[in-house]
Amino acid sequence: MLIAIEGLDGSGKTTQARLLVEHLRQEGKDVLLVEEPGATPVGREIRRLLLEHGGEIEPLAELLLYEASRAQLVRRVVRPALAAGKIVIADRFALSSVAYQGYGRGLPLELVLQLNAIATGGLEPELTILLDIPPEEGLRRKARPAGRALDRLEGAGLEFLRRAHEGYLKAVPPPPTGQVLDARASSEELHRQVVALVAASLRA
Ligand code: TYD
């Protein structure tokens, strides 16, 4: 079973993915946590290119790099783990590209969906949990001391995140495959909700 945890930066998804993995392991389940981009040596190089490269990357080039990382991850790590009967928890998956590169950067959705399908070979999560956070709140949690106003660049970033946020809400699959949780809840409360959704999905 493949479970994707999605959300804007600052939504707490990495914390929740880790808590979920610990919880499932305590239940004796065989679980693998993967993060995108990254999780393979090639993926980590691509992640470095994407996140640390100083120059501008064209939106199309950016999309193709995320998809290259995804293709590597699915073939080298995710499929073998699923075949071995593991539960795979993905800290981001294909829906991130729809939200960020499709809605955020404005690339044609049809193109993003096509490339997602090619990169994943059609593999889709049985459950996608979207940790929903207002973009302003996500930014605040990520980067800044409380109370300081956004500067111009952060403001441009905010517009991008607003589009990605809207994209997430539009593109998340309907329940039970897709589930939206309010990420402003405490980490403990959110964890309880995540565990309940995963338990229901494992029973189904
Ligand atoms: P992530 O590792 O979740 O962020 P963090 O370092 O805060 O844990 O994701 C890194 C960035 O990559 C994030 O800003 C979202 C972006 N991203 C995309 O734009 N498209 C994608 O397909 C993926 C997987 C990530």
Image (cartoon, grey):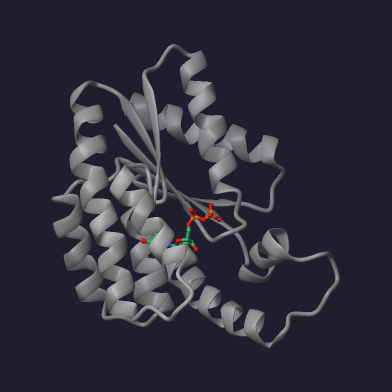
Q: Residue at x 68, y 40 (%)?
A: 187
Q: Quadrant of residue 60?
A: bottom left
Q: Residue at x 14, y 58 (%)?
A: 118
Q: Quadrant of residue 134?
A: bottom right
Picture coordinates of residue 135 (x, y %)? 61, 69
Position of residue 134 in the picture relative to residue 198 (left or right) = right
Position of residue 25 in the picture relative to residue 132 (left or right) = left
Q: How many marks?
A: 0
The image quadrant where one finds the N terminus is: top left
Picture coordinates of residue 54 (x, y %)? 48, 74
Q: Residue at x 20, y 35 (%)?
A: 79
Picture coordinates of residue 146 (x, y %)? 84, 65
Q: Is residue 59 visible?
A: yes
Q: Is residue 172 visible?
A: no
Position of residue 202 in the picture relative to residue 199 (left or right) = left
The image quadrant where one finds the C terminus is: top left
Q: Quadrant of residue 98?
A: bottom left
- Image height of 74 relative to 195, above or below: below
**Which residue is the extreme one toward the bottom?**
152
Picture coordinates of residue 87 (x, y %)? 33, 27
- Image height of 108 relative to 183, above or below: below
**Which residue is the extreme one toward the right?**
147
Q: Nearer the viewer, residue 202 or 4?
A: 4
Q: Nearer the viewer, residue 165 or 157?
A: 157
Q: Residue at x 39, y 76 (%)?
A: 103
**Which residue is the extreme one toward the top?**
28
